[in-house]
Amino acid sequence: MKISQLNLQTEKTWHQVFGVLDRDGQPLNIQIRRMIVHAVETGLLPTDARLPSSRELAARLGIGRNTVTAAYQQLIDEGFLASRQRSGIFVCAVVKPAVITEATRRPSDWATRFAMKPSRLPQISKPRDWRSYPYPFLSGQYDPGLFPTNNWREAVRATSSVQEIQVWAADMIDDDDPDLIEQLRVQVLPRRGISAQPGEVMVTLGSQQALSMLVQLFVARDTPVGLEDPGYPDLRNMMRLATMKPVFLTSDDHGLIPDDAFGRCDIAFVTAGHQCPTTSVMPLARRNALLDAAARSDVLLIEDDYDADLSVEADSDIPSLKSLDRAERVIYIGSFSKVLAPGLRIGYVVAPKPVIDELRVLRRLMLRHPPTNNQRSLATFIGLGHYRQHLSRAGAAILERARLIERLLPETMPSCRLRRGDGATSFWIEGPPELDARAMAEIARAQGILVEAGDIFFSVPAQGRNFFRIGFSSIATHRIESGLVKLGAIVEDCGRRALCHTA
């Protein structure tokens, strides 16, 4: 007897089709439609299979009957289902289900074919399910409580009209959305003191792609490249794949030091706004000294201003290196990942036009251009004034969290030294010399607390053994105090145990 003749009314089948609804996810009617379409496409629901009535399915899923009715009707309109009078809802003959067969595979020695093995490089590791942890003290992650959901929806709706779709749906070849370029020039870059012409700005897939392309454009195997140490691990890995001559540069409380080692570089990457990972803000005098040293030694500077705009603190208003540059020696990288949402994947490069022209060709060879619908939505979001409003609201929340942590850390971790530059969304913590921060982080993770061990930021990991980073852009304010009390107990206990073991 065919399974359709049994009306598929078995608990096992319906459990396979509908599973569990995510009450915090997409609208329920969309989830139901996706479940049914998946079951039809994979053959779990064959042609002429009868579905439960809307009343039955609503009761089974514990939702309103209108939600099920709306889902069924949409699938009927789209031809997946059919309503037969006095008989019920049935699956139409829409597609032939794909037949997947497992072919016999012979193992291949892929390792001998790789031109490089990036997986062997030290990597920043964060749990994919970090949001399920009660105390995610992570840097640069997304806090749903701070995201301007309604304003973003308005921007997306505004860019979803037929006329707007005709604009952004076209192939831009190697160009960007002109509206976003204009909003960057008029509303975003001036906040960092930067004036740029349209041909001097290019959109990227976050600052990560910008860094990668600039490495490809300027760094050869014999190019001496200056890197902050400690510094951004992914950039250090990019450089290890690109050149035989990385130059690890020293930083102090004022940021990168323009010493003799700096002068021997052809190009240097710097995080002047907030040094990564120490969060130090480079003062104006050091910025000018760095520019003077770069001019004397003919060093090109790449300024990664990865979290600009978010601060509401006074000392963060120091002009960017790019704004102080009078010799076209500074290439500027910005991003919306830290200030809005990492998943948006929109960053930008500001550089002289000849550099942007080459970057556009390089980007086209990779991916042509970042998704234009996202570009247009962001441009509309900025143009409506929502970006400025978001910065004010988010900046105030970040400052509140920073002050709370600043008050609690001396109480909860008395053996540690803390550092945070004005406007930073994390604290750089130096534990007692005997602390193994990586082991401590694993113990904390087992208790629902996420922190980042500091050794990954150093070219010689052992030099960062007792350092760790506490971020607070991804944790709700009301969880901070209890989280720090628990974390402090772990840190102090690990320090005492290590000291006793050493003694």
Image (cartoon, helix red, strand yellow):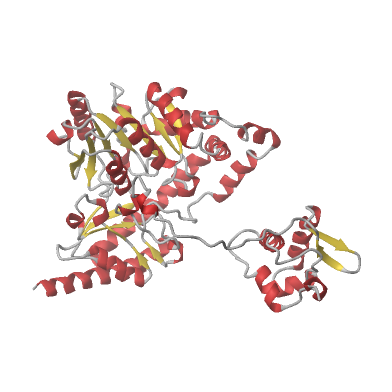
**Image spot of residue 162 (x, y percent):** 70, 36
Could you tell me which residue is drawn at 35 percent across and 72 percent down? Answer: 446
Which residue occupies the foreground of this view, 13 or 447?
Answer: 13
Residue 251 shown left or right of residue 485 in the figure: left
- Residue 238 to residue 72: above or below: above
Question: How many dots with numbers?
Answer: 0
Determine which quarter of the picture holds residue 31. bottom right
Whether residue 358 can be seen here: yes
**Image spot of residue 95 (x, y percent):** 75, 55
Which residue occupies the foreground of this view, 196 or 51?
Answer: 51
Image quadrant where one finds the C terminus:
bottom left
Could you tell me which residue is drawn at 41 percent across and 40 percent down? Answer: 209
- Residue farthest to the left, as pictured: 503
Image quadrant where one finds the N terminus:
bottom right
Whether residue 274 can be seen here: no
Could you tell me which residue is drawn at 64 percent across and 39 percent down? Answer: 158
Which residue occupies the foreground of this view, 79 or 409?
Answer: 79
Residue 239 shown left or right of residue 101 in the figure: left
**Image spot of residue 354 (x, y percent):** 39, 21
